[in-house]
Every structure is written in structure tokens, then in C-alpha cells.
Image: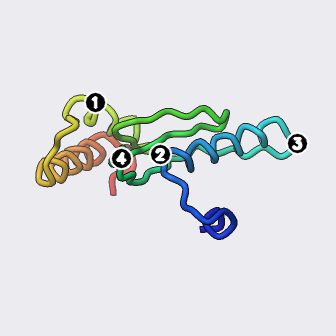
Amino acid sequence: QLYKMKNGYDLSPIATANFTRRFLAEYLRSRTPYQVNMLMGGFDKEAGPVLYFMDYLASMVDIPFAVHGYSAFFSLSVLDRYYKPDLTKAEAIELVQKCLDEIHTRFIVNL
């Protein structure tokens, strides 16, 4: 919103991700770097839904799915196996349930 007020137009999700990546890269070379791993997603009218992962070294990659935290070790294997680009809403809900089942089965701290 700040960019829109200053320049008169919105940034696309791709432009926002590149702006953020450049900002992280500039601060990486300063005395106060940001130590973050982040997911940034959005919807672009031309590109459709997009999801980006940026790490603390300011590298950026476009990814189809992502998870964070300790449970990522278990959930990523499920997503790698069952994810497909044309999932229906019901299939996506079933996939999330499979991830949750895997976490409940394998995670040491069972919630």
C-alpha cells in the first residue's frame, strides 16, 4: 500500500517478491542483516497464484508448495509424493489431512 501511495500503482506479487529479495540482499551486506526465512504468496491476473521462498541469504525461488518449522521435515515428503498442479479443493483438503496425519504419527511432541 505504501508503494501504491508513493508511485500511484500496485506492485504485482512477482515485483513485490523481487523488491523484498533485493531489500534482504542489501541488508545482508550491512551490519544489521535480517535473519529470516520467509514465504511470500499472491495472486497475479497474468501468472495466477504464485508462491516464493526466500532464505536468510536473500536467495529466492518460485515453488508450488511449502511448509515451515519442525513439521516441514515430515510434511514435505507427503507433499512431494501426492502434490499435483491441478488439485481440486477436495483433493487439497485430503492432502493437508495426510500431512497432519504424518505429523501426528511421527512428531515427537504429539499434539
The CA span between labels 3 and 2 is: 27 Å
**Residue closest to the far front:** 8
Cα–Cα gap, marks 4 and 2: 31 Å
Amino acid at the residue labelled 2: Gly
Identity of the residue drawn at 13% across and 49% down: 88
> Could you give the CA–CA distance between mark 1 and mark 4, rounded to whole angstroms?
26 Å
Q: Are marks 3 and 1 in contact (CB under 8 Å)?
A: no
User: Label 1 crowding class (10 Å Cα cut-off): few <14, some 14-19, many 20+?
Assistant: few
108 relative position to 31: left or right: left
Q: Secondary structure at mark 4?
A: loop
Residue found 18% across the figure and 53% down from its top: 93
Disc 3 vs disc 2: which is toward the camera?
A: 3
Q: Amino acid at mark 3?
A: Arg
SS of the residue under disc 2? loop
Q: Earlier in the sequence, mark 4 or mark 2?
A: 4
Q: Which residue carries the number 4 mark? A: 46
Binning the other alpha carbons within 10 Å of mark 4 as few (below 14), some (14 to 19) or many (20 upward) gives: few
The residue at which mark 3 appears reads as 31
Residue 1 percent location from the top left of the image: 59, 68
User: In this view of the protein, which residue sits in the foreground, 104 or 10?
Assistant: 10
Label 4 vs label 2, nearer the camera? 4
Q: Position of residue 57 (x, y in %)?
A: 67, 33
Give residue 69's mark.
Answer: 2
Front-lying residue, 8 or 111? 8
Mark found first going from the N terminus, 4 or 3: 3
Give the x, y percent position of residue 62: 44, 35
Q: Label 3's element?
A: loop
Q: Is residue 106 above or below residue 4?
A: above
Contact check, label 4 and label 2, Cβ < 8 Å: no
Q: Which mark is residue 80?
A: 1
